[in-house]
Image (spheres, rainbow, N blue to C red):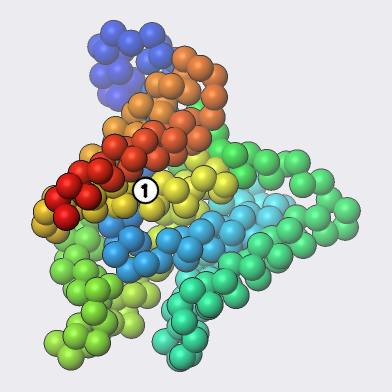
Amino acid sequence: MSLWYTLCEAIPLEMLRWDFMKNALLALLLMAPLFGLLSTMIVTGRMSFFSDALGHSAFTGIALGCICGMTMPIYAAVIFSVLFALLFSFVRSRSNQAADTLIGVFSSSAVALGIFVATLGGGSFTKYNKYLIGDILSVTPAEIGLLALVLILVLLFWVLSVNRLTLTAIHPQLASSRGIPVGLSQTLFTVAIAVVVTLTISSVGLLILNSLLVLPGASARNVAKNLRQYHGFSVLFALIAGLGGLTVSYYSGCSAGAAISLLLTLLFAVTFPLRKRRA
């Protein structure tokens, strides 16, 4: 971290005088590629509501961790979210119900369980507000290290599986006929979403987390002409919104997560006419 602090001090920006802003900037630089890459597959596979359901399951895991007296309830949230994703993949592979129906079942159940656990015994819900709104300015070096590790693992997974994931998302029957393990690919991808959602929930907030997982890919789809541009634009838009949102947050005193989400919405609005023109 000392090297990062030294690099930030060389940049003539007032907001980088503070260590918490340096931490927040580094965290955003790690989160943006994660959101950008995962967003493309979430949009292509029509899984936007599933990522929202995972956020609810992460909140339930945090509540369970707090009830059990864990000093770092985020670890309980990771475990619970991964189990949630695996259970969803298992049920989805063995059910003829539409995916949105199953997502609705899992999402509503996760919300209800989270609220039940959080308020069990008359407990106060206010201590969980930071997970609903998020506060990237409170991110710690340990959390940044976890994000860096997850980014490396996701990039490795992406390099090895991007073509299979894309074909699986677009046409699972064709992917299966070509020998691609559709179930395994979908399971690994849902686990990756679960881990990313859980590790970022305290930074950007549950209420707007899903927008960060949908809007970069949706905006990129408006302007991309091929798969490489699709991924590249998605990561680029996530970076632009992340850096812009952090800057707006510092000078206006608003929530960084909300500012990032609004900038992503603006990018979608700007790119949408380009999609119409190309059509």
Image quadrant containing the C terminus: bottom left
Q: In this view, does 33 lie to the left or right of 67?
A: left
Image quadrant containing the N terminus: top left
- Say which residue label 1 marks: 215
**What residue lies at 39% left-to-right and 52% top-to-bottom?**
213
**What residue lies at 24% left-to-right and 63% top-to-bottom?**
157
Q: Quadrant of residue 22?
A: top left
Above or below: residue 84 compared with residue 138: below
Instruction: List x then y, in percent, for residue 28.
Output: 37, 35
Most foreground residue, 246 or 273: 273
Mark 1 surroundings: few (<14), some (14-19) or many (≥20) residues within 10 A: many
Most foreground residue, 267 or 213: 267
Instruction: Name, please, the residue furthest toward the right.
Output: 122
Instruction: List x then y, in percent, for residue 232.
Output: 18, 47
**What residue lies at 38% left-to-right and 53% top-to-bottom?**
214
Instruction: List x then y, in percent, for residue 139.
Output: 49, 34
Q: Quadrant of residue 189?
A: bottom left
Instruction: List x then y, in percent, for residue 64.
Output: 68, 60
Q: Would residue 187 be visible to someone looking at this image?
A: yes
Which amino acid type is marked by label 1? Answer: Leu
Q: What element carries label 1?
A: helix
